[in-house]
Image: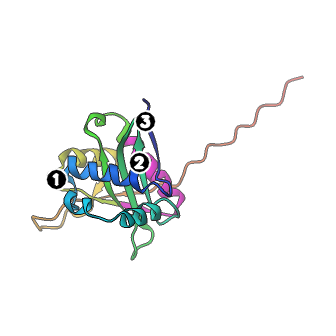
Amino acid sequence: MKATIRRLNVGEADLYRRVRLESLRESPEAFASLYADAFLRTEESWSLQADASAEGGDRATFVILADEPIGVAALYRDDTRPEDGELMQVWIAPGHRGGDLAIGLMDTVFHWASLNGFQTIRAEVTHSNGRALRFYEKYGFERGNEGNTAIDRNPILIKRVERPRIAPKITPAPASS
C-alpha cells in the first residue's frame, strides 16, 4: 500500500496515541519521553494534545499512514520566539526507513511551517542517534550549538524555512491565425 503523509485530524487521538507509543517502544533511545510514562497518560490528555495539534497555526502533528501508522513528526511554535519552531517526535517505522518517506515527512512539515509564518526550525537529536543526525544534516539542518562544551548536551540542529513556492500560472499562447 502506498503511504500517505498528512496532518492529524481533530478526533484522531487514538491514531496519535498508537503511533507515538510505538515510536517510544521501538526507539526509546531517540526520545526524552519514556514509553511507560506515555502509556499511563489519560485518554483526555491524548485527546487534548492531538486535537490542539490538528488545528491552527501554532503546532501541527503529521502522520505517515500505510496499512497502519508508520511515522510521525510534530512541530510546535516557540512561546518566546514565535518565528521559531521545535521539531519533535520524529519517527519512521524500521521497515520503512531509508527511502523517501523521511524526506516527504520533512517536506510536509516545512511546507506547513512556511505557510504559518515560521522562519526557523530547530531539532534536538540524541548523541546516540547517528542515523537521525546524518539525515537532518543531509536535509539541510546545521548544528546550532557547536560552541557548547557540555558533554551531556545533545546536538541542536537548525534550518531556515523557505517561503512557499507558488507555481507560476501558465497562460496558453494565443492560437495562431
Rendered image: mark on residue 63: 2
Distance from disc 3 to disc 2, alpha carbons, whole Å, reads 10 Å
Residue at image location 51% in from the left, 64% down from the top: 57
The residue sitting at the left extreme is: 151
Q: Residues in magenta?
A: 103-121
Look at mark 1 in the image and give the residue it sits on.
Answer: 29
Cα–Cα span, label 1 and label 2: 21 Å
Colouring style: rainbow
Amino acid type shown at disc 2: Val
Horizontal and vertical percent for residue 62? 42, 51
Question: x, y percentage for residue 147?
Answer: 18, 66
- Which residue sits at x=44%, y=52%? 109
Residue 158 drawn above or below residue 130: below
- Mark number, residue 3: 3
- From the viewer's perspective, is 74 left or right of 55? left
Q: Amino acid at mark 1?
A: Glu
In the rendered structure, which disc, 1 or 3, sits on the residue that comes first in sequence? 3
Q: Quarter of the image containing the C terminus?
A: top right
Position in image of residue 72 (x %, y %): 36, 49
